Image (spheres, coloured by chain):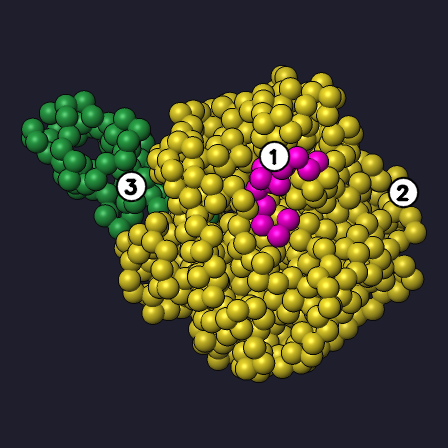
Chain colours: A yellow, B green
Amino acid sequence: MPNGYWGKILRVNLSTGDIKVEENDETFYRRYMGGMAMVSYYMVKELEPEIDPLGPENKLFIFPGVATGVPFSGSGRHCVGAKSPLTMAYGKAEGGGHVGAELKHAGFDGIIVEGEAEKPVYLWIHDGECEIRDAGKLWGLPVKETQDAMRAELGDKLIRTSLIGPGGEKMVRFACIINDLKDAHGRTGMGAVMGSKNLKGLAVRGRMQVPVADPDKMKEIARWAATDGVKLAQGLHDWGTGAAMVGGEQTGNLPVCNFRGDWFPKANDIDAKTLGQSPLRLGMDACYACAVRCKKQVKAEGKFFSDPDYGGPEYETLASCGSNLGITTLEPIAMAHHLCHVHSLDTISAGAVVAFAMDCFEHGVLTLKDTGGLDLHFGNAESAVKLIDMIGKREGIGDLLAEGSRIAAQRIGKGAERFAVQEKGVETGMHEPRLKRALGVGYAVAPHGGDHGFGPHDPMFEGPSRAFDEAKALGLLEPMPSSEMSDRKVALAASLHPWVAFRDSAVICSFVPFGYGQYVDIINAVTGWNTTAIELARVGERALNLARVFNVREGLTRADDTLAPRYFEPMVDGALKGVAYKRDELEEAKTTYYTLAGWDPQTGVPTRAKLAELGISWAAEEIARVPATPVR
Amino acid sequence: MRVRARFFGDLKKFAPHDEDVVEVDLPEGSTVSKLVDAAHVERGELWRASIKNQLVELDQVLQEGDEVFLFPPIGGGQSR
């Protein structure tokens, strides 16, 4: 087995109680490397089409990557995947913290959780062993109380946890999984899948060091990341994400009141720098081995409160639970973050679903009768916080909104679909595609819905920024305006997406500013292989193509690769007043993207030739299983 | 004339003494570009500038007392 791996994948069947350790050969590890690519592989191989994502036939795939747990900045993340209750197709989410590294230190390259436990359970994974334990007394507890109880029961305060709160137990479709107390596998409802299996979470403890082929080279890379790398990410180090919200507002990127497109003069009041300079922020924290330390610790007291043990709001939360709700002060945003962590809800989707409800309310589609007397005008912070709590508990209208904005809009009718800002059922990240055109293509074609992490973020490629300079190594030499929509812009997205998928497979954090050559150095230093950038990009392509095959097999078509209706409307005011995404422009971009990706230009289905190039010809047989009638 | 540059996100690294704002004396008729250079901001790191909540080009002529906001490219975490 190569360095960087143990060659051991844990398979736990919660229906039967069986626990097995499976081994794969080196070719398997080299082909998929971990994270998203392994999730994609197992999803296509092991999940039958059209299963209920919240039924026992679904499986939860938990995969660190080749880099996870090797001590250098950016190696603390791992990926969780399953059929998603939001997309009703492919789902996955990366998360930070320490659990992925701890899992590697416990001797495992991944976990496959099958079936459904009869009663609530959790997994205790430590030093090459796994045990299914009773979680009857933990069921119903918030995330923090659950972690406290698990550590007390197992007698070890250093145990790392990956948990759901009551929102996951109640299968809120956008429930997430919280690593320790602060970091989330936020997107696509992985916490709901965990809850559907009566699985409260994982407790993990490991004491083994991941074997590394060239320790001296790894130390050199780790030193660079902790010194030069941190200098390049100084803003993140000092303030965390969200320290340029005024720039977002003044250029049109900041979502305001459900992405209606508007000025937001109070942007600076909810900015990460303002937060950092206020008494609310107690300090900064880090994922495993990371010197960037971009994680905030925020404490609020009084009417709006937040426990600093749950960390603090990232940019996505400052926007989703702030400007996008018309909320202009930090305390209610901190409390929204707090409640999302108590219940294990994705802060992006939770905020976006409240924004959806507020837009419906302001347009008379929802009334006080529907909301149980809750005034849902934009800017009403008390109502927003109350509604998030109701969603976590599935109380009142919170029960409907817990289905996510796509399903809620279908049930409400009356044109509510217009206000559901989601792609493939996943509420969009807090970045404006009418400003960032290539990001709009990314939102549309991503197999897992509107993910801002999929990128690319057009402003980075307008001129000689670090991201632009790095991309020259991939042959992307021409700067392009953010507003440009052209074949070369689509080519930028198509060239960079495999690298995003590689990074999510390895798994390496995008906030540590490694260049593409450094990714090659990392993989070679860890494994001892002789890899190149070409091979790493193919790992990413493999992840994306298998995810695409999974979605094709579920009946998704070209029509599902689209943007939320909101983005085809002109922005009402602000820096981009009157600007809209054009439908024909997007359709043309999709055809170009499919062609560049090696997919059928019209249907977007991966071609046999592309699958053969990637060494996954077997996946072509899966495409042949496409149902006659798309089911969603 | 005296003008100010205010740094956002990663541009803060160009600010002296851990401040996020710098005051500079420039000749009458100076442009935003001149201020950017005087504040020692690398052009490649700058994406947009604004004065009084309006985006401005680098050749915009400054007035006494202007405060220019300098923004890095807005990426996946806003400043990256």
The residue sitting at 30% across, 45% down in the picture is B47
Chain to which the residue tagged by mark 2 belongs: A
The residue sitting at 91% across, 48% down in the picture is A119
Q: Is residue B55 left or right of residue A79?
A: left
Q: Amino acid at mark 2?
A: Gly
The residue sitting at 13% across, 33% down in the picture is B61
Q: Residue A307, how many percent across, how many down?
A: 64, 29
Count of numbered circles in the view: 3
Which residue position is annotated with label 2?
A136
Q: Quadrant of the N terminus of chain A?
A: bottom right
Residue A19 image-quadrant placement? bottom right
In terms of secondary structure, where does tag 2 sit? Answer: loop
Residues shaded magenta:
A412-425
Residue A178 image-quadrant placement? top right
Q: Marks 2 and 3, how far apart in space?
A: 55 Å
Q: Please determine whether, in this image, residue A236 is positioned above or below residue B65.
A: below
The residue sitting at 44% across, 66% down in the picture is A592
Q: Marks 3 and 1, how far apart in space?
A: 31 Å
- Does mark 3 fall on the same chain as mark 2? no
Which residue position is annotated with label 1?
A356
Chain to which the residue tagged by mark 3 belongs: B
Extreme-front residue of the structure: A414
Which residue position is annotated with label 3?
B48
